[in-house]
Image (cartoon, rainbow, N blue to C red):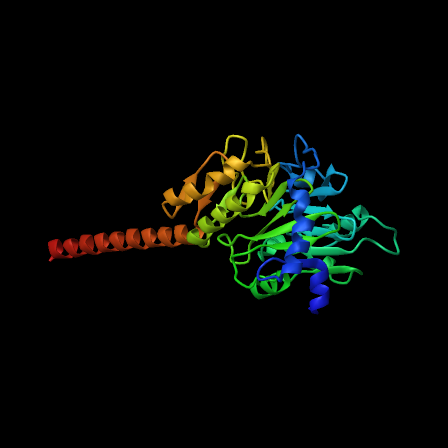
Amino acid sequence: MRPHKLHRFVCRLSDAPLPTLAAISLSASPAVAEPVSGSLPAQWNIGAEDCAASPQPPLQVHTYEPQTFILRQSPCATFEANFIYLLIGSDKALLIDTGAVADPQAMPLAKTVLELLPGNERKKLPLLVAHTHRHLDHRAGDPQFASLPSTQVVPFDLEGVRAFFGFDNWPNGNAHIDLGGRTVDVIPTPGHNQTHVAFYDDRTGILFTGDFLMPARLLIEDAGAYRESALRVVDFLKTRQLTHILGGHIELNAAGRAYRFGSRYHPSEHRLELTRADLAALPAAFERFNGFYARYPNYILTNPVRNILTLGFIVVVVLGVGAFGLYRFLRRRRRRRA
């Protein structure tokens, strides 16, 4: 990407010269103002026991406030049931994630986003498409945006993320996206995945956390990095107002129990929004984490790779013990016959 195009979308904080720092300070000043209030629905699309018998729109679109939209992919369209966020400024808009479905016929994400953007059919507000991380269920819809005019898609690999946002000392430092009268901070949050970032919106006071923190299974790739990310975000928010923490999925019911993996029906679904208290408790939860599994009221910590390896080891041991026992049994029978 050309440097001048990068500067239009992102203002760097790390190692910036004094004039740039001054400009960033001015652009970030609305963060101390009272956030614009918004609303969340009483219930999201929870899918159906029989999706074939219960046709439903692939996308649920909720207007949090006139410049902030939350899109939920139907559990019947994809069991991932992703949440996608559209933030609109006066100069450009930001789309956070593109969900788990590539087919525009099955999931008309780009068409829906374009309809929400200000402007007319000939000219829409410029759009920046970014990702919380590189997992396919958060970027499968990227091809729908690839050929759209005035649209830029941020690379999803680590080097691409670092280069685009100007992270010279990953995962330290923050970046800023200037949407025009609305600044979004980009905070590195590796742990679930090495490319993970969270987005803080100064207009609404919402922290968009992808798979880093949500009412779901928090799948751990690197527990140490995850804890450091939690501490980093807690520190970042000390001087900022926080209204909601909104993640990428809901996988728990209201009682904190996880739905079966792959379920397309979420009865009595947990609320989407989490709080500052949930975030504040996360570093301590990792300090106590046994490395395998721990359940809390609003999320579950789990290391799937370690769990699978441990289960595989147990299976091998059990089979080995069984085989040894069978060998001894047969050997004794042969001795008795002899």
Residue 253 visible: yes
Query: Residue placed at 57% from the left, 56% from the top?
Result: 135
Q: Is residue 217 left or right of residue 153?
A: left
Residue 245: give x, y in percent of width and height: 59, 40
Q: Is residue 91 left or right of residue 246?
A: right
Q: Is residue 259 left or right of residue 336?
A: right
Report how many numbered discs are placed on residues in the image. 0
Residue 72 visible: no
Image height of 11 relative to 289, above or below: below
Which of the 4 image quarters holds residue 130? bottom right
Residue 86: give x, y in percent of width and height: 71, 47
Which of the 4 image quarters holds residue 323? bottom left
Which of the 4 image quarters holds residue 152? bottom right
Residue 210: give x, y in percent of width and height: 58, 48
Query: Residue placed at 38% from the left, 55% from the top?
Result: 309
Residue 231: give x, y in percent of width and height: 47, 47
Specify the quadrant that holds the C terminus.
bottom left
Image height of 132 relative to 47, above or below: below
Of the pair 147 and 209, the residue shown nearer to us: 209
Q: Is residue 35 left or right of residue 281?
A: right
Residue farthest to the bottom, as pictured: 2
Specify the quadrant that holds the N terminus.
bottom right
